[in-house]
Image: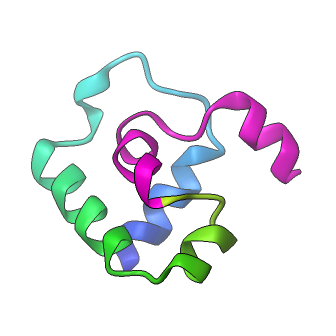
Amino acid sequence: MSTIISLIATWFKPKATDASAISEREVRQAVAELNALDDRELEELGLTRSNIEYAVRYGRPQDQLNQAA
């Protein structure tokens, strides 16, 4: 669960230019942890099952960040 919390915290920071900042193992672990959440919990995070991997790898799109604020 701590992986999810740290990942969510990075969504609100500017993106690093180096895409290798997060390892593939960390990506798989975060995706697995998010997939373990139920749909209601994902909705509270502003996610759907179909965009979990995208959000883990690239963060939430800028328009979603603006809507959440």
- Tell me the quarter of the picture where residue 54 sits: top left
Residue at the image point whose x is 17% and y is 56% from the top:
28
| Left or right of 14, for residue 17 | left
Does the magenta segment cover residue 55? yes
Residue at the image point whose x is 61% and y is 30% from the top:
14
Magenta residues span 49-69
- Image position, residue 53 (x, y; %): 34, 47
Q: Nearer the viewer, residue 16 or 43?
A: 43
| Left or right of 31, for residue 6 | right
Residue at the left extreme, as displayed: 25
What's the coloring here? Answer: rainbow
- Image position, residue 35 (x, y; %): 33, 71
Residue at the image point whose x is 45% and y is 63% from the top:
6
Residue at the image point whose x is 13% and y is 43% from the top:
24
- Tell me the quarter of the picture where residue 49 sits: bottom left
Instruction: From the image, give the main secondary structure of the stretch colored magenta.
Output: helix
Whether 34 is drawn above or below 58: the answer is below
- Image position, residue 1 (x, y; %): 37, 81
Count numbered badges in the picture. 0
Whether 46 is drawn above or below 13: the answer is below
Does the magenta segment cover residue 67? yes
